[in-house]
Image (tube, rainbow, N blue to C red):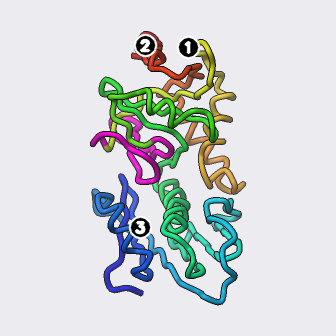
Amino acid sequence: MNVVPFVLGIAGTSLRVFGPEIWLIPLRTAWAAWMPTEETPAWDVKLTVDAHLAAPQGPLFDVRPQCRGGVCALCAPGFQATVDAGQGMGHLCAHPDATPADIGYFLRVVLALQAFTRGGLLFHAAGVAHHGKGYALFGVSGSGKTTAAHFSAPDPVLNDDLLLLWPSAAGWQIYATPFGKRRGAVRCVALHGLLRLVKDSDVFLAPMTSAQALGELVANTPVLSADPLWLPEVLARWETVLAHIPACALHFRRDSTFWEVIDAELG
């Protein structure tokens, strides 16, 4: 293990990453600002190079975690990885051809589990700070998260793909993450609305039933919904969020007019 690890932290999460400098140097350069903001116990993450593994046939991002009993595994040519939520640790063994993007994806999986065990949720959504209020614009790949973030200018964008939801005494907060594109310096804002993106020629907000909202939110919760052990708590946690935060389907087109509708109905 290296003497000086790379440390990644957001809200109440903290990962201490050990491994070869060829992988850690890019992380230190790109994610220098993402240090723990408070004293929290860190999970140790070990990265190991293994030239005996077959060469990767694609990015680790294409591999979906297989989770059961609180342990997640990612296995593919060039990669052997496990994350044990009970032990609070992760290990990635990878071929020398693995890239910093592969390492970043593995850390994202570890962070999803750690955040969950500490009361938060990693969430596939674009986060926009609009008039001082936080909106999470979510949906499956291709639903328009990056497009909506682009047409939200000049509002700060915490991230165009992945947010961290975190509880506080003042309510649920959304935090920026390093796993996507950002605009502006805002790192955290109180969550005010959950908006399921729907591409349309018209612009309007449509109510969602609790069942619809839960299904959509769980579908956009990475890693956790893959394990039957965690699914009941994932549902319960989203129900807690929905008890305080409205969820709607946002029908929008490729311009900024959807913010006029949001301001009129949710502002």
Residue 62, given in percent of the width and then of the height, sits at: 66, 59
Name which residue lies at 41% across and 37% down.
Answer: 172
At label 1, which amino acid type do we have? Answer: Val
Q: Is residue 55 above or below residue 156?
A: below
Label 2, secondary structure: give it: helix
| Residue 166 on the magenta segment | yes
At label 2, which amino acid type do we have? Answer: Glu
Residue 133, given in percent of the width and then of the height, sits at: 35, 27
Mark 1 neighbour class, 10 Å CA radius: few under 14, some 14 to 19, many 20 or more: many
Among numbered discs 3 and 1, the one appearing first in the sequence: 3
Question: Is label 2 or label 3 in front?
Answer: 2
Residue 24, given in percent of the width and then of the height, sits at: 40, 74
Give the residue at mark 2: 260
Question: Is label 3 or label 1 in front?
Answer: 1
Give the residue at mark 3: 15
Name which residue lies at 38% across and 35% down.
Answer: 171
At label 3, which amino acid type do we have? Answer: Leu
Give the residue at mark 1: 203
Among numbered discs 2 and 3, the one appearing first in the sequence: 3
C-alpha distance separating marks 1 and 2: 9 Å
Name which residue lies at 66% across and 74% down.
Answer: 56
Label 1, secondary structure: give it: loop
Residue 157 shown left or right of residue 98 in the figure = left
